[in-house]
Image: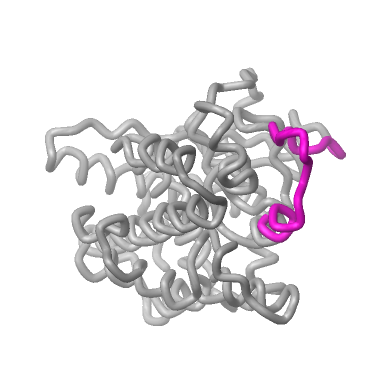
Amino acid sequence: MRWDDFRRSDNVEDDRGGGGFGGGGFGLPFGGGGLGIGTVVVLGIIGYALGIDPSVLIGGAEMMNRGSYQPRYEQTVRRSAPNDKMGDFVAAVLGNSEDVWIAVFKESNQTYRPPKLRLYSGSEPGGCGQAQAAMGPFYCPNDRRIYLDTSFFRDMQVRFHGCSGKACEFAEAYVIAHEVGHHVQNLLGILPKAHNAQRAAGSKAEANRIQVRVELQADCFGGVWANRSNQRWKALEPGDVEAALQTASAIGDDRLQKQARGYVVPDSFTHGTSAQRQRWFSIGFKDGKVSACNTFGAAQL
């Protein structure tokens, strides 16, 4: 992936080794019943998958019934421009995503307001509770931030075999693009509607099925970014798309559950199967249009 010419974003907050509180738990507003076995399984998956705010996913229908989300945390974080290669890479990818989505939104006479992206190490308080590295990257709609402990990129290579060598750069960019996709959903009003639908769901399985559509659409939006970025900056190199598809496959719910316990429980899926994740990224990459990413209207995912 050729990213040297990408504009660096000013929206990266580098708090690695800074304001986090090591050892703190993730503050989830669970009901009196605590963590049920189904929730524990989902929590295990979230530790190794891309995702939106874990407090949305882990609680499932139980959390959705507790009412609307409100920001619970405000922090004046120590802001500093990243000065290492990984930080520079993240700032470049985020900056490029901003340029792409500003153009896409402008086509519909809309204004794109970019998210913040906070780099942290180990643990970090935020608008959706205590972020921890084991959760993987996620987007918090409360404070419109992406939270990223870059150790996930190492896990992606070593634990999940999602990519190898230089091809990992585009796979890592896909991870960031997926989270930016959730922000796009938030700006378009899709996330609030999905949350309302989950609160009205009659079961956790039904709420999870809605979440799968949310996640697959974010994968598709990641594909839209890749398409538009490559058209303008010719950033892709041979093997890049294959690396992203390999990563999408590595973090499918079916594969993760199979690795964790030897069998799968489709009703507990929250992100989609490996095949679904690959398919929707490919759709976005092929068409390069937001309209192609209507996972909610698709009869079959």
Residue 36 on the magenta span = yes
216 shown above or below 179:
below
Q: Residue at x 49, y 47 (%)?
A: 202
- Is residue 151 among what the camera can see? no
278 or 88: which is nearer to us? 278
250 or 16: which is nearer to us? 250
What are the residue bounds of the magenta stretch?
22-42
59 shown above or below 45:
above
65 or 280: which is nearer to us? 65
Q: Residue at x 31, y 55 (%)?
A: 296
Identify the image quadrant of the N terminus.
bottom left
Identify the image quadrant of the C terminus.
bottom left
Q: Residue at x 12, y 34 (%)?
A: 109
249 shown above or below 226:
below
Q: Is residue 257 left or right of residue 209?
A: right
Q: Is residue 107 left or right of residue 87?
A: left
